[in-house]
Image: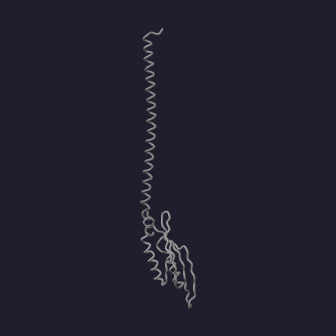
Amino acid sequence: MITKQAKEYFGLGLVLAVLGVAVLSYVFISTHNNGTELIQANQAVLDRSADIKAYAEIEALMAKSAVERAAMEAILLTEEDTINFLANVESLALDNNVELETNTLVVEDLVSAQVLNVSFFITGTSKQVLSLLTQLETLPRVSYLTNVDITYIENVGLLEANAAVTMAVIMKKYDQ
């Protein structure tokens, strides 16, 4: 038969065993939860590090492309520059001794820029008209001739030309 003292020790051992299992379970659950939080915190640090690295790369790219962007800024027109641009074209026409009539001015909005579409009617000798067209094609701007229609007319031994010209000029577009 089991003595009273053995029963007490057995009961005390059972209580201590249950208490030990409870403490170990608490430690395991607590460690698991802390591990999960640690993994989430580590992921947040990695994400932040990636963001910092991407930001540094963008800053380096911006610094590296500053010269190229400044060069592009120099050749793109602003809205204020369009009047000067048209005055420059009219001055070129005078220098070439041709008559120039501006027919249309239309600004077309694109995603990152605006395009100024201009049409001219040019009259003069064929040599003068072709010289002006060459100068228009090589203007120091982001521009191009989209349409040229030349009609030649023989007039008292001179070959005269009438040209209908459409030109597109890329302009800066600022966020509004």
Q: Quadrant of residue 22?
A: top left
- Give the residue at x 45% y 19%: 14
- Give the residue at x 44% y 44%: 44
Q: Quadrant of residue 29?
A: top left
Task: Report if residue 137 is visible in the image.
Answer: no
**Which residue extends farthest bottom?**
156
- Give the residue at x 44% y 33%: 31
Q: Is residue 46 above or below residue 161?
A: above
Q: Nearer the viewer, residue 37 or 85?
A: 85
Task: Report if residue 22 is visible in the image.
Answer: yes
Q: Is residue 109 above or below residue 160?
A: above
Q: Quadrant of residue 23?
A: top left
Query: Count the marks: how many?
Result: 0
In the rendering, at what x and y percent does residue 69 appear? 44, 64
For the rendered model, the colour scheme is: one colour
- For the C terminus, give its image quadrant: bottom left
In the rendering, at what x and y percent does residue 150 appear? 56, 80
Q: Nearer the viewer, residue 162 or 144?
A: 162
Q: Is residue 149 above or below residue 52?
A: below
Q: Is residue 19 above or below residue 109?
A: above
In the rendering, at what x and y percent does residue 93 appear? 47, 81
In the rendering, at what x and y percent does residue 108 appear? 50, 68
